[in-house]
Image (cartoon, helix red, strand yellow):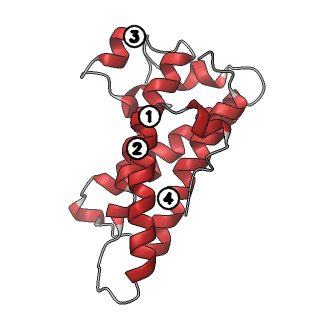
Amino acid sequence: MNVVPRDSTLWEYMPDEIRDLIEDGEIILNFVHDYHEQADISDYSFMVFPFAKAYEGFLKRFLLDIGMIREEEYFSDEIRIGRILNPNFKGKNAIYEKLSRYKGEGKNVSKKLWKTWKQGRNLVFHYFPHNYRKLSYNQSLDIVNMIVDAMANAVVHIKVEK
């Protein structure tokens, strides 16, 4: 199963290293699809990991390509996408408001990118003892689809100069 159609605008936009992560994720999805009913797995979060990593790479590349971050920031180990994309973050590097001001669907794109970051990365990757979260097989698939949809939506609605 190809989660990202190979003839899509999104696939064309992504660099090889992000495509590789998507393909790795698709291999995992296909394998788990074939065996999840026989397995006794308590948490399917691992299905989301390659897509969440691809999402972070996509966001960095996308923000660079639309001029929201500089090349030095793109290559820096210090940039924190979740911080600068957060709608509550204020400062010179705040992305959410800048992205919201894009013509057309900018506001919807920024909302979708942030919601996806929070649901598809933060709540999957972090362990909260007071709110331990395990993902079922179907919840993991939903998050993978949310990530792919957010990326596709961004490249379709925001003009990217490649």
For the point 58% across and 31% down, which residue is it? 13
- Mark 1 lies on residue: 16
In the image, which disc is placed on residue 44?
A: none
Residue lying farthest to the bottom in this orientation? 38
Q: Is residue 62 left or right of residue 130?
A: right
Badge 2 density bin: few <14, some 14–19, many ≥20, Cα 10 Å: some
Discs 4/2, front: 2
Q: For the residues marked 1 and 2, what is the alpha-carbon distance in whole angstroms?
A: 6 Å
Mark 3, residue position: 71
As drawn, the residue found furthest toward the right would be 104
Which quadrant would residue 78 be assigned to in this image? top left
- Percent across and percent down for residue 123 are 37, 54
Among numbered discs 4 and 2, the one appearing first in the sequence: 2
The amino acid type, in three-letter code, at marker 1 is Asp
> Residue at the spot x=35%, y=53% of the render?
49
User: What residue type is disc 2 on?
Assistant: Asp
Verify CB contact (< 8 Å) between mark 1 and mark 2. Answer: yes
Which disc, if any, is residue 20? 2
Quarter assignment of residue 124: bottom left
Earlier-in-chain disc, 1 versus 3: 1
Amino acid type assigned to the residue bearing label 4 in the image: Ile
